[in-house]
């Protein structure tokens, strides 16, 4: 059985590396560091999951989301938004376009893999809620 294909779109090299390493244990992962590179990658591949940042150089996460959802070839792909701005107007727009899940940075490998497994295990259904906890810090615990 072949491994699921994941495209990670993240402009922060450290975050991109973390996402690639965490997901690469189970999936075939390709990474793009800006929206234009992501668009080229999406033109060349048909991923099962796109892990997408919101605020990207050259072409925004909103525009990439629009492209994915409007393409018959890509519309099946689940979209997992990983962002530091879960309550932003951009995320609201992406939710309206049908993103499947939103996770708040910083995200743990465990939460990332749980979300990926869930999204890849069955038919695509939007789950618009974020994983923001009562502190608004997502998966991170308060320090200090």
Image (cartoon, rainbow, N blue to C red):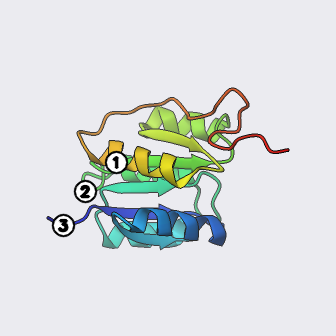
Q: In this view, does 31 lie to the left or right of 28?
A: right
Q: Quadrant of the N terminus?
A: bottom left
Q: Residues within 10 Å of mark 2 (few under 14, many from 20)?
A: some
Circle on res. 73: 2
Q: Is residue 19 left or right of residue 89?
A: left
Q: How far apart are marks 1 and 3 (CA)?
A: 15 Å
**Residue at (31, 53) in percent of width and height:** 71
Q: Nearer the viewer, residue 51 or 143?
A: 143
Task: Name the N-terminal-most of marks 2 and 1.
Answer: 2
Q: Nearer the viewer, residue 79 or 61?
A: 79
Residue 87 vertical position relative to residue 11 in the rendered view, above or below: above
Task: Name the N-terminal-most of marks 2 and 3.
Answer: 3
Circle on res. 132: none
Label 1: state its secondary structure: helix
Residue 104 vertical position relative to residue 11 in the rendered view, above or below: above
Estimate the x, y position of residue 107 in percent, counting from the top left: 59, 50
**Residue at (65, 69) in percent of width and height:** 14
Q: Distance between the residues labelled 2 and 3?
A: 19 Å
Circle on res. 2: 3
Q: Are marks 2 and 1 in contact (CB under 8 Å)?
A: no
Residue under pointer 1 = 117
Q: How crowded is mark 3: few (under 14 residues within 10 Å), some or many (20 or more)?
A: few
Q: In which quarter of the image is residue 133?
A: top right
Q: Can residue 72 be seen in this view?
A: yes
Label 3: state its secondary structure: loop
Estimate the x, y position of residue 100 in percent, counting from the top left: 41, 39
Q: Which of marks 2 and 1 is in front?
A: 1
Q: Residue furthest top?
A: 134
Q: Quadrant of the C terminus?
A: top right
């Amino acid at each position: 059985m072949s491994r699921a294909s994941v495209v990670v779109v993240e402009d922060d090299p450290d975050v991109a590396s973390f996402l690639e390493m965490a997901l690469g244990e189970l999936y075939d992962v390709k990474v793009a560091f800006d929206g234009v590179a992501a668009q080229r990658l999406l033109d060349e591949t048909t991923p099962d999951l796109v892990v997408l940042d919101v605020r990207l150089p050259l072409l925004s996460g909103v525009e990439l989301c629009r492209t994915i959802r409007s393409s018959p070839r890509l519309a099946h792909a689940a979209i997992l938004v990983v962002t530091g701005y879960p309550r932003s107007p951009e995320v609201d727009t992406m939710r309206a376009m049908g993103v499947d899940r939103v996770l708040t940075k910083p995200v743990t490998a465990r939460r990332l893999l749980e979300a990926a497994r869930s999204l890849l295990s069955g038919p695509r259904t939007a789950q618009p809620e974020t994983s923001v906890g009562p502190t608004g810090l997502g998966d991170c615990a308060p320090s200090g």
